[in-house]
Amino acid sequence: MTLPASPIRLYRHPLSGHAHRVELFLSLLRLPFERIDVDLKGGAQKTPEFLSKNAFGQVPVIEDGDVTLADSNAILVYLAARYDPSGRWLPRDPVAAAHVQRWLSVAAGQLAAGPAAARIASVFGRKLDVEQARGIAAQLFAVIDQHLADQRFLAGDEPTLADVAIYTYTAHAPEGGVSLEPYANLRAWLARVEGLPGFVPMKKALS
């Protein structure tokens, strides 16, 4: 397995689900990395220094040697392509790769607009349409629960980037007032992800 010449630097916030999905994948790959907390409340993400790393002023960002990369899903794809020669996490087969990409799109779409948005409103006090976000979350989780009725992971019977991208905001959906109780298959999948070697949880938001 290829390893970075020096630990990858991960700019993150401990309560950011986007940052956690990158931290989780780094840990699953057993890659050496350094966490660098960004004071979002204090506006550190809007300083010229940070904006030079990500012009959108968002975490996560990684620095891997001379590569600086933002956007959690883009980072996941980069890490898989560079450090997983087996192709386990991002399959090379066109159909299997498309199944993974489908869930990366869901992570940037319904997951972000649903459970992630509801959690942002609750945890960070962002003014959002919480009821709409919770409705999107319920629809999404119903689809995922049905999808998982006959397979162990989102893109098949083995874990892929699909599971890494969807896990965090799903597991922490109750922090946004979205119950996971109706979705037995989804909860069983969460437990399978949490049982993977190298799994690391995200810090729970204070109530």
Image (tube, helix red, strand yellow):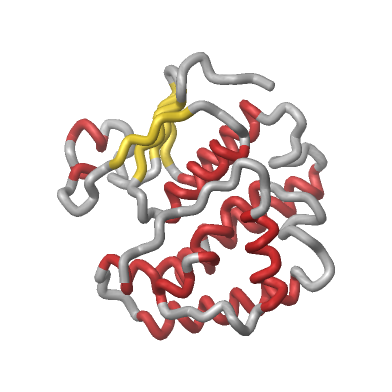
Farthest residue to the top: give it. Answer: 5
Residue in the image at 26% along x and 74% along y: 127
Residue 119, by quadrant, is bottom left
Left or right: where does residue 159 sit relative to residue 13? right
Which quadrant is home to the C terminus? bottom left
* Residue 68 seen anywhere in this rendered image of the structure: no
Of the pair 200 and 75, the residue shown nearer to us: 200
* Residue 191 seen anywhere in this rendered image of the structure: yes
Residue in the image at 77% along x and 37% along y: 92
How many numbered discs? 0
Residue in the image at 70% along x and 47% along y: 160
What is the x, y in percent for residue 111? Answer: 52, 66
Which quadrant is home to the N terminus? top right
Left or right: where does residue 60 sit relative to residue 182? left
Of the pair 165 and 67, the residue shown nearer to us: 165
Residue 106, by quadrant, is bottom right
What is the x, y in percent for residue 176? Answer: 40, 74
The answer to whether 87 is drawn above or below residue 148 in the figure is above
The answer to whether 94 is drawn above or below residue 204 in the figure is above
What is the x, y in percent for residue 50? Answer: 25, 35
Residue in the image at 65% along x and 79% along y: 183
The answer to whether 135 is drawn above or below residue 71 in the figure is below
